[in-house]
Amino acid sequence: MAGIPMISTRRDAAGSQAAGSQAAQGTPMLLWLDVAPDGRVLSADPVTREVVGPAVHDGGVFLVEPRRAFLAALDRADDCEDPVPSVLHPDTGGDPALVQVNILPFKPGRIRIVLFVEPEALADPEPTASPLTRREHAVLELLAAGYRRDRIAWELNISLPTVDLHARNLRRKLSALTTSEAVATATRIGLVRR
């Protein structure tokens, strides 16, 4: 199915998920996304958008194989009376980058999925951000240095609404929900000098 990322899990003879060998040397990176009980993506962090792909955009559907186990885990997590978290382990033959998938009750109608991913598999990601203007980059550098909005306006000799406009553009271009998240993403992909 196009546009629906599939993550394989395997079951042992007893029917429970098996972890497989983990030859990872580093600590897995945590990624998250929030889904509705039917698997429709409600929100996700920017790195998850890059890793999981197009289904995280436009309210796509996120599924883990086998679907039956994943959908049952979503049902258990969305149970109004007694929500239960679940853990799925990936089939290491499919995607060795994915170590574990946790399905956690978050609030009614919203389930948090935490993906444990090997950082080596995500090494050298291509920046997906739109090119920043010179002024947006200047605002980004000052935000990363810890400057407040009013100080940035004074430093760059621009108005406060203009700083807000550049910050809004940075969030949009970096697929971030907050300005802090935009700065963290920009730092991660190398747009900010350290």
Image: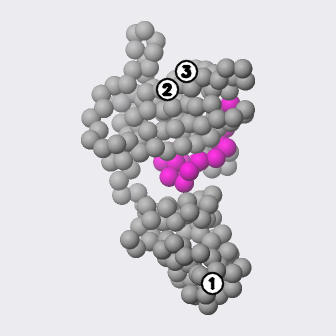
Q: Which residue is mark 1?
A: 153
Q: Residue at x 68, y 27 (%)?
A: 78
Q: Secondary structure at mark 1?
A: helix
Q: Secondary structure at mark 3?
A: helix
Label 3 with label 1: CB-CB less than 8 Å = no
Q: Quadrant of the N terminus?
A: top right
Q: Which residue is mark 2?
A: 87
What amino acid does circle 1 point to? Ala
Q: Quadrant of the C terminus?
A: bottom left
| Marker disc for residue 69 | 3
Does the magenta segment cover residue 50? yes
Of labels 3 and 1, earlier in sequence is: 3
The residue range painted magenta reads 37-54
Q: Residue at x 51, y 32 (%)?
A: 102
| Picture coordinates of residue 140, whole percent (x, y) | 53, 74
81 or 37, which lies in front? 81
Disc 1/disc 2 C-alpha distance (Å): 47 Å
Vertical arrangement, residue 159 with respect to residue 65, above or below: below
Q: Residue at x 44, y 20 (%)?
A: 17
What amino acid does circle 2 point to? Val
What amino acid does circle 3 point to? Ala
Location of residue 74 (image quadrant): top right
Q: Secondary structure at mark 2?
A: strand
60 or 110, which lies in front? 110
Label 2 with label 3: CB-CB less than 8 Å = no
**Nearer the viewer's eye, disc 1 or disc 2?**
1
Callout 3 environment at 10 Å: few (<14), some (14 to 19), or many (20+)? some
Q: Residue at x 44, y 39 (%)?
A: 116
Location of residue 99 (image quadrant): top left
| Picture coordinates of residue 14, whole percent (x, y) | 43, 9
Of labels 2 and 3, earlier in sequence is: 3
| Picture coordinates of residue 118, whole percent (x, y) | 36, 42
